[in-house]
Image (tube, helix red, strand yellow):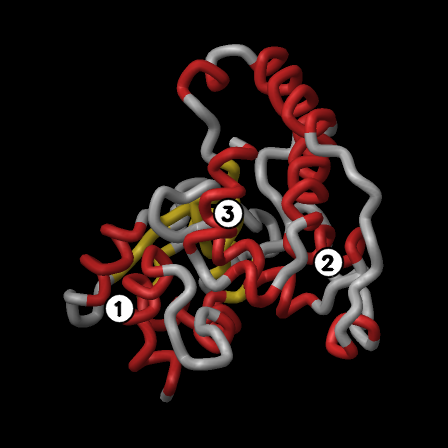
């Protein structure tokens, strides 16, 4: 996985925005989350631990959710019934299909509350999940050992950011491991400073819902 991180860092504009030692920090972060049995990675928590602005942390994650992704984007909405609150996950294909149907309905998997899909669009959130190699998926212990081994191989002293942009960056403790990122917020963050798309995987979904959100 670390080799894949390095390849992504070199092939994309990621290297123009982030120092390379954040790759090691990300590996350590994955290890910590695995140790705590957390399925999803929080860019809010990563921002807090690395003293990054939240928007930069989210962009860091988006670079890793591009071609040959390291992170998979999971879409969901939360049931508004206060006695339920279930997280209902939607695949990218389901989102595209629902956008092509007028007055489409969707049901909470837990309590079966009915929603008009257009009504829940602004409330769609995303999680980020690490895509592990197939040989790691079968055994949680082997996953932990592999992450630990990879991270120990690249331990270096983390220098301070030199640029004014990062010297003045404020950390945040906003959000926790259970918080998702609002999809409409990603609509503004999925581009580099020169306007290039960061995650094509995400952009396809944004194209399906953007017209509605823009209104």
Structural crowding at the residue carrying mark 3, measured as other residues with C-alpha within 10 Å and reported as few (<14), some (14–19) or many (≥20):
some
Of labels 3 and 1, earlier in sequence is 3
Of labels 2 and 3, earlier in sequence is 2
Q: CA distance from mark 2 to mark 1?
A: 29 Å
* Residue 144 placement (x, y as % from top left): 65, 19
Q: Are marks 2 and 1 in contact (CB under 8 Å)?
A: no
Q: Please name which of the two marks, 2 or 1, marks the residue nearer to the observer.
A: 2
Q: Nearer the viewer, residue 8 or 96?
A: 8
Structural crowding at the residue carrying mark 1, measured as other residues with C-alpha within 10 Å and reported as few (<14), some (14–19) or many (≥20):
some
Q: CA distance from mark 3 to mark 1?
A: 21 Å
* In the depicted structure, whether residue 151 falls above or below residue 209: above
Q: Nearer the viewer, residue 125 or 26?
A: 26
Disc marking residue 47: 2
Of labels 2 and 1, earlier in sequence is 2
Determine whether, in the image, residue 171 is placed left or right of residue 175. Answer: right
| Residue pictured at 79% horizontal, 64% vertical | 161
Q: Please name which of the two marks, 3 or 1, marks the residue nearer to the observer.
A: 1
Determine whether, in the image, residue 21 is placed left or right of residue 212. Answer: right
Q: Quadrant of residue 165?
A: bottom right
Q: Which residue is mark 1?
A: 208
Q: Which residue is mark 3?
A: 87
């Amino acid at each position: 996985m670390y080799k894949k991180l390095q390849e992504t860092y070199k092939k994309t504009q990621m290297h123009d925005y982030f120092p390379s030692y954040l790759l090691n920090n990300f590996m350590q972060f994955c290890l910590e989350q695995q140790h705590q049995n957390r399925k999803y990675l929080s860019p809010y928590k990563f921002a807090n631990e690395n003293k990054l602005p939240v928007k930069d942390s989210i962009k860091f994650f988006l670079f890793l959710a591009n071609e040959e992704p390291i992170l998979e984007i999971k879409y969901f909405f939360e049931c508004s019934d206060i006695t339920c609150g279930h997280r209902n996950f939607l695949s990218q294909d389901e989102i595209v299909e629902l956008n092509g149907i007028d007055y489409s309905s969707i049901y909470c998997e837990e309590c079966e509350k009915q929603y008009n899909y257009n009504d829940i669009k602004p409330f769609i959130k995303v999680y980020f999940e690490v895509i592990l190699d197939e040989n790691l998926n079968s055994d949680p212990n082997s996953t932990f050992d592999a992450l630990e081994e990879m991270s120990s191989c690249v331990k270096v002293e983390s220098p301070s950011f030199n640029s004014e942009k990062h010297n003045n960056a404020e950390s945040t403790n906003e959000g926790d491991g259970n918080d998702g990122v609002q999809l409409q917020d990603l609509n503004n963050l999925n581009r580099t400073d020169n306007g290039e798309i960061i995650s094509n995987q995400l952009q396809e979904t944004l194209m399906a819902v953007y017209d509605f959100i823009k209104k």
